[in-house]
Image: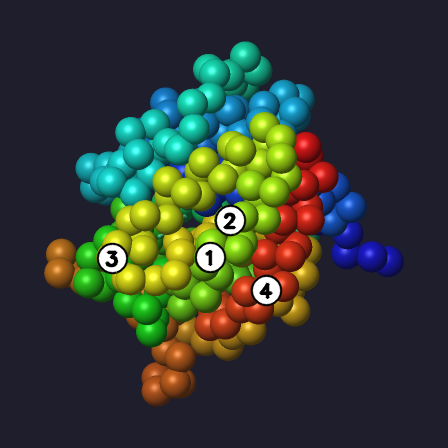
Amino acid sequence: MSDFPRKIIIDTDPGQDDAMAILLALGSPEEIDLLGIVAVAGNVPIARTAENARKVCEVAKRPDVKVYAGCDRPLAHTLVTAEHVHGKTGLDGIELPAPEMPIQDQHGVDFIIETLRAEPAGTVTLCPLGPLTNIATAFQKAPDIIARVQEIVLMGGAYFEVGNVTPAAEFNIYVDPEAAEIVFKSGVKLTVMPLDCTHKVLVTAPRLQAFKDFGNHLGDVVAGWLDFFERFDVEKYGSLGGPLHDPTVIAYLIKPELFSGRFINVEIETGSELTRGMTVADWWGVTDREQNAMFMGDADAEGFFTLLTERVRRLA
Ligand code: RIB
Ligand code: CA
């Protein structure tokens, strides 16, 4: 029996790269059955991430997708946002109208709990693309759902690439390290797309041009987002383009062979302010700590962008 379509919940803080992940999922109905989108506070506050998730669905002409608002702040820290990367709206790069589709009344955490209880055990994959606050809160509120999760495939963390928001930590984990600790210690099958992997899928000029060549509104929107989003990383790293972090999560579900990594122990620093949110990845196996995560270290960038461009084009 085919593994497809995979039933997933996307938990997200759009974010231009989150937006690309949502478009990739919506452009891949054979492989992905998107049960719902839950917004979380991260790149920008929850009001904006909940609005942005709906803007993305409307760009994809999918106002039927159910979008929920989740947690508005991390478990134990004040919210740190990333307007310096994503702009004030979180989707800077092109003006989009306010969404007409509704936000669901149910809290996003309750949607996650209800869905995991309603669907057969082991059939729903959680795809966090932002801070892990909603996932951790759902696990705390309803521990019975933990064993029912098929897999968590998340974007977050770093080892060789170290930090992008502090010298030690990647943004998603840094914003809510206590939530990350709950998720990484939950025992759920965990696949991690860290900066080590996402820094290898850069939006180079030819890859950006491929979207511009759509010659339609969708191509203009995507090109506007990516053009804006990449300037922070290009300036900081001197790279040939911005790293397209979040769509690697969905691409992994569709074509896992695009990525490679190791099954290792990964723990989260929560005690030190200096290294808060660091993913302490035992890549070299120097401890006897239990392995708990498939930690990706490499990506086939050409294959990734071919898939992404082809699937997003379908939505035009
Ligand atoms: O560090 C990159 C991650 O932080 C991405 O998910 C980006 O959208 C931001 O949330
Ligand atoms: Ca994100």
3D distance between C-alphas at marks 3 and 4: 23 Å
By what rule are the colours in the image chosen?
rainbow
Q: Can residue 254 be seen in this view?
A: yes
Choose between 104 and 204: the one closer to the eye.
204
Which circle's residue, 3 or 4, is located before the other in the chain?
Answer: 3
Which circle's residue, 1 or 3, is located before the other in the chain?
Answer: 1
3D distance between C-alphas at marks 2 and 4: 13 Å
Q: Position of residue 69 (x, y in %)?
A: 45, 26
Q: Is residue 105 left or right of residue 150?
A: left
Task: Quickly name the residue at label 2.
Answer: 208
Depth check, mark 2 against mark 4: the one in front is 2
As helix, strand or loop, the secondary structure at mark 4 comes to helix
Amino acid beneath label 1: Thr
Q: Residue at x 55, y 73 (%)?
A: 260
Quadrant assignment for the C terminus: top right
Q: Are marks 2 and 1 in contact (CB under 8 Å)?
A: yes
Q: Are marks 3 and 4 in contact (CB under 8 Å)?
A: no
Q: Position of residue 43 (x, y in %)?
A: 33, 38
Q: In this view, does 168 lie above or below 85?
A: below
Q: State the mark number for residue 204.
A: 1
Badge 1: residue crowd in 10 Å (few <14, some 14–19, many ≥20): some
Task: Quickly name the residue at label 3.
Answer: 236
Which circle's residue, 2 or 4, is located before the other in the chain?
Answer: 2
Look at the numbered disc 1 and say if its residue's Cβ is closer than 8 Å to ligand 1.
no
Badge 3: residue crowd in 10 Å (few <14, some 14–19, many ≥20): few
As helix, strand or loop, the secondary structure at mark 1 comes to loop
Task: Quickly name the residue at label 4.
Answer: 302
